[in-house]
Amino acid sequence: MSTPSPITLVPVDADNWRAVGALKVAEGQRDWVAEPLYYLSLCHYSPTGWRPLAMLDAEGTVVGFLMWAVDPEDGAAWLGGIIVDAGRQRRGHGRAAVEAAVDLIATEHGVTSFALSYEPENTVARALYAKLGFTETGEMEDTEIVARLKR
């Protein structure tokens, strides 16, 4: 997978959680994406085992967030809570972050199956994930379409 915009993923920690919490969700995405502090709380309190990652641009600035967890039932790594700051969108950060997450999780954790979900009306996300090789499976997660990628 090629990387259109240099993005590094690092664990959310004591040094960067405030910058992650300060990320702004774009107005037109609020129906599909929660605020970053909600996702950080989910990572901390949910029994699912979500692991939070900050997206850093080439200058080391936090420009986004995503979280991931392995589903014990099928062994797939689920990607969720994918946010690119409203002021940093349309630069390839989201695409680069998903590619980096797949590479990181596959390399460091040996996972070869990935999944994510999105609302059917979120056509931008739907098109992006399809370009990255995620295929809709017919599964639904609540009201969201599930798409999967095998490496």
Image (spheres, helix red, strand yellow):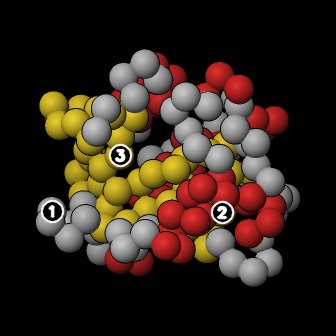
Residue occupying image coordinates x 15% and y 62%: 74
Dot 2 amino acid type: Ala
Residue occupying image coordinates x 80% and y 66%: 18
The C terminus appears in which quarter of the rendering?
A: bottom left
Mark 3 → mark 1, Cα distance in angstroms = 13 Å
Q: Compare marks 2 and 3 and give the one earlier in the sequence.
A: 2
In the visual, does 23 lie left or right of 10? Answer: right
Residue occupying image coordinates x 51% and y 63%: 42
Point out which mark residue 74 bears.
1
Residue 12 falls in which quadrant of the image? bottom right
Classify 82 as above or below 56: above
Secondary structure under tag 2 reads strand
User: Mark 1 touching mark 2, by CB under 8 A?
Assistant: no
| Residue at the spot of label 2 | 54
Secondary structure under tag 1 reads loop
Residue 103 falls in which quadrant of the image? bottom left
| Residue at the spot of label 3 | 116
Q: Compare marks 3 and 1 and give the one earlier in the sequence.
A: 1
Dot 1 amino acid type: Asp
Mark 2 → mark 3, Cα distance in angstroms = 18 Å
